[in-house]
Amino acid sequence: MSDPRTTPSIFTRGAVDLSSLRSPAPAGPRPAEGAPTRAGGGPAGGPSTGAPAAAPGNTGGVVVIDVTEATFQSEVLERSMTTPVVIDFWAEWCQPCKQLSPLLERLAAEGGGAWVLAKIDVDSNQRLAQMFRVQSIPMVYAVVGGQPVDAFAGAVPEAQLRQWIGAVLKAGGVAVEVPEDPMLGAADEALMMGDLDAAEQAYRKILNESPADAAAEAGLAQVTLARRVQGVQPAAVFAAAQAAPDDIAAQLLAADVEVLSGQAEQAYDRLVGLIRRSAGDDRETIRKHLVSLFTVAGPDDPAVAKARRALASALF
């Protein structure tokens, strides 16, 4: 996989040639009567044997589908002509995927069929991964009208993911009510575009009016994080951290890069371990840095809850 990215949730646009995937594909077996909203015949998060597409304009109650190359045309390309499809490229060994995939599934269920989540295991469907130029996972694509319209790599906070999905639904002509207010939407857009000054100003304005706004707090923490890693080379950062395991500055920077590359749990473990080996002012510096990374993910992230328990154990 490629080096971790150095900015939070980089959203990309570009042509993906899917012409070779538009040939008729063999149909998979039909799911049993009364099957859950997840389709595909395989276990949750596991390989799929395929499932028939719902009728045009109707998801048939299906909101999550396990997709293979054999079912890609019907389940993604054809389905996207009437319903936006979000593709989650994942793998069993990918830890960041275990953060992002359950969140995507929950939001798909919450959407009630307004969009469909198509899960593709890159290990079992390498040709699809190559066609979509997947270099790191998790990688998420939105497909509308048979064409990819937007994408991002790495795990992202829920508030930012909701904003992205709202934009995808608008692109697909779906009337939706985006829960975030316009000020937060403008702040998130500035962050996505890399305009850190504008994003910071917008988030601070929100917090001045609503000091407990968790989404704005997370956004502002992302701005601070993005500034800390501007211009760094991930490979050099990790090499320096490996060479000096007790160098606090090197370890903090490595944790920053890990969070931005979707490896938040690895970053948390890194800093908790460093706290266990530190004392005094150094320990407090590391603790504050770790807490700032928790803010990026938001209070409801299960990885944060787990890391907070580990932090408490390390401190006391």
Image: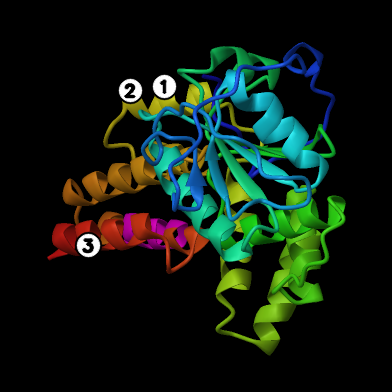
- Label 3 environment density (alpha carbons within 10 Å; few <14, some 14–19, many ≥20): few
- Judged by its main secondary structure, the magenta piece is helix
- Label 2 environment density (alpha carbons within 10 Å; few <14, some 14–19, many ≥20): few
Q: Which mark is residue 243?
A: 2
Magenta span: 284-293
Q: Is residue 17 magenta?
A: no
Q: Which mark is residue 309?
A: 3
Contact? badges 1 and 2 (CB < 8 Å): yes
Judged from this view, the residue extending furthest toward the front is 33
Who comes first in sequence, dot 1 or dot 3?
1
Please state which of the two labelled residues, at mark 3 or mark 2, is closer to the viewer: 3
Name the quarter where the C terminus is drawn.
bottom left
Label 3, secondary structure: give it.
helix
Q: In x, y percent, where is residue 266?
A: 35, 40
Q: In x, y percent, where is residue 76?
A: 69, 34
Given the image, on which type of amino acid does mark 1 rest? Ala
Q: Which mark is residue 239?
A: 1
